């Protein structure tokens, strides 16, 4: 008997997928490979439609859309196809002498029906990349794209059923109401990417069914720069990572920490780097995106007064344009330092040195990523051992998520669990323990009762 409240299913989607899963549709390696190949075909044959949708939602340049969305998923598919057979192989585990002869191993089994909930900022990548892992691990999947990227959501809802097996994959479009109804249903895993407030809602809903969750959240990812590095090259890297997708990237450098001397020397290089990346005029540059909606635009505009504008600061209400902006003289308690910025504003906060920078980082929540530009091995070691974050990037922001062998995920307030490559297969599987022992010889005789004499070795 179940004590779950009776909830009318939103659509027959979950029962259909559960039947598909229970009938074994998703089990074979051949089916999994076919799904991944079909997803790759979908991306290849409809790249223009997806790029148009991403442009409509975020003003994303088609090259940037290819680099940061479609190609990322295709790379994940290729990597998974190359390694999947090996990843799924049972793993032998040694048995203690007292149990010998016996064989112990673990095998990965699919969890069942998985729900993937994606945000609007990389609306294609962040829906499909988890789906690659879920399908490769042999699950059925409900995909819930973000309603705040409606063109991409519509394109996915139209195209996914044309390529992937409808017995095991479904797209459910909608906003909070639909997601709330979905969350009332029973899933075997929920994979959520978005903000931490909704992360708590997801985890609470999942708890009703004891459903495991992966929460890919965000937060303020710091970047620290010291005086041992080439500041022109550093500025280029930071500007690229920060202003990609108009700053609407979960792993973008959120704020910059440097001594007043380094900050003063770095600022002109940041100004030059921005000019170089966006043809001297980000507003007319086809390479620069726009803010996703009015609510985010208004919030970001309100943060522009948090310091002295060193470059940028311009806005256009009509197109929701916010120039790539660098703010100096930013106090540690300024509004821009009280929330994840998630837009094209880079505040520079001055510190007295590495000790102070570490103290600032540790005073905040554990970030999704932490970046440092330093040639000092001591500084690198201290950053690695004295701070906690989902990932650390030395000399480069953002790019760690393109290394398939690196788990991608947060810690503490920036997330729970990880994915990418092999880690995705582990996330979407149960590692089942298997012990095999033959009846003869019956070495267990030694521990059977009656306990007429001590058999425990004491
Ligand atoms: P969003 O508003 O699109 O929300 C994400 C999803 O949650 C959507 O599918 C939406 O329908 C659903 N949702 C929203 N409110 C809900 C509610 N009340 N109940 C149930 N479901 C609800 O995206 P967002 O949260 O604004 O995304 C931005 C955040 O995501 C930032 O904090 C960013 O750092 C984080 N993020 C993290 C990663 C990562 O990989 N760790 C990637 C991208 C974004």
Image (cartoon, rainbow, N blue to C red):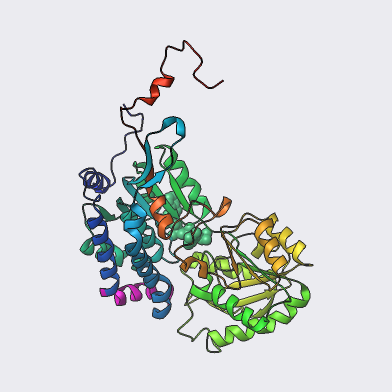
Q: Residue at x 61, y 78 (%)?
A: 313
Q: Does the image show residue 131?
A: no
Q: Is residue 247 magenta?
A: no
Q: Is residue 55 magenta?
A: yes
Q: Quadrant of residue 367?
A: bottom right
Report the residue that reaches farthest toward the bottom. 280
Q: Residue at x 27, y 55 (%)?
A: 170
In the depicted structure, whether residue 106 falls above or below residue 443: below
Q: Return the residue nearer the eye: 392 or 304.
A: 392
In the depicted structure, whether residue 157 falls above or below residue 239: above
Q: Does the image show residue 205?
A: yes
Q: Residue at x 75, y 65 (%)?
A: 354
Q: Residue at x 48, y 66 (%)?
A: 401
Q: Quadrant of the C terminus?
A: top right
In the depicted structure, whether residue 227 falls above or below residue 103: below
| Relative to 323, 182 lies left or right | left
Q: Return the residue nearer the eye: 402 or 201.
A: 402
Which residues fall within the magenta stretch?
45-61
Report the residue that reaches farthest toward the right. 352
**Residue 21's x, y, as percent?**
25, 46
| Relative to 338, 83 lies left or right | left
**Residue 372's x, y, as percent?**
65, 69
In the depicted structure, whether residue 413 falls above or below residue 98: below
Q: Return the residue nearer the eye: 272 or 376.
A: 376
Q: Predominant secondary structure in magenta?
A: helix
């Amino acid at each position: 008997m179940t004590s779950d409240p009776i909830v009318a299913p939103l659509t027959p989607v979950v029962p259909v997928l559960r039947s598909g899963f229970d009938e074994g549709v998703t089990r074979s390696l051949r089916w999994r490979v076919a799904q991944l190949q079909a997803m790759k075909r979908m991306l290849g044959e409809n790249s223009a439609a997806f790029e148009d949708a991403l442009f409509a939602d975020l003003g994303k340049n088609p090259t940037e859309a290819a680099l940061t969305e479609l190609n990322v998923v295709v790379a994940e598919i290729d990597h998974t196809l190359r390694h999947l057979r090996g990843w799924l192989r049972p793993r032998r585990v040694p048995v203690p002498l007292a149990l010998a002869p016996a064989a112990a191993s673990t095998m990965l089994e699919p969890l069942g029906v998985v729900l993937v909930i994606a945000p609007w900022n990389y609306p294609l990548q962040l829906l499909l990349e988890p789906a690659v892992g879920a399908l490769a691990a042999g699950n059925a999947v409900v995909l819930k794209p973000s309603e705040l990227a409606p063109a991409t959501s519509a394109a996915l809802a139209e195209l996914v059923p044309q390529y992937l097996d409808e017995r095991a994959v479904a797209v459910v479009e909608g906003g909070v109401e639909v997601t709330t109804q979905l969350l009332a249903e029973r899933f075997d895993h929920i994979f959520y990417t978005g903000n931490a407030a909704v992360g708590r809602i997801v985890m609470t809903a999942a708890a009703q069914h004891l459903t495991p969750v992966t929460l890919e959240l965000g937060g303020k990812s710091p970047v620290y720069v010291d005086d041992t590095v080439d500041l022109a090259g550093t500025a280029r890297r930071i500007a690229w990572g920060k202003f990609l997708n108009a700053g609407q990237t979960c792993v973008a450098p959120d704020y910059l920490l440097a001594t007043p001397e380094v900050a003063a020397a770095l600022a002109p290089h940041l100004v030059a780097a921005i000019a170089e990346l966006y043809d001297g005029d980000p507003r007319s540059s086809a390479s620069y995106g726009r803010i996703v909606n009015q609510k985010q635009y208004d919030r970001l505009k309100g943060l522009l007064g948090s310091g002295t504008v060193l470059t940028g600061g311009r806005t256009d209400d009509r197109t929701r344009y916010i120039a790539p902006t660098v703010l100096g003289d930013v106090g540690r308690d300024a509004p821009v330092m009280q929330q994840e910025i998630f837009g094209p504003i880079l505040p520079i906060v001055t510190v007295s040195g590495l000790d102070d920078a570490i103290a600032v980082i540790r005073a905040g929540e554990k970030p999704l990523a932490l970046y440092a530009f330093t040639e000092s091995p001591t500084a690198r070691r201290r950053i690695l051992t004295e701070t906690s974050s989902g990932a650390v990037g030395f000399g480069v922001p953002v790019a760690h998520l393109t290394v398939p062998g690196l788990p991608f995920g947060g810690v503490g307030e920036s997330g729970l669990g990880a994915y990418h490559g092999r880690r995705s297969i582990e996330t979407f599987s149960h590692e089942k323990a298997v012990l095999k022992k033959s009846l003869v010889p019956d070495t267990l005789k030694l521990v059977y009762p009656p306990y007429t004499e001590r058999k425990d070795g004491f």
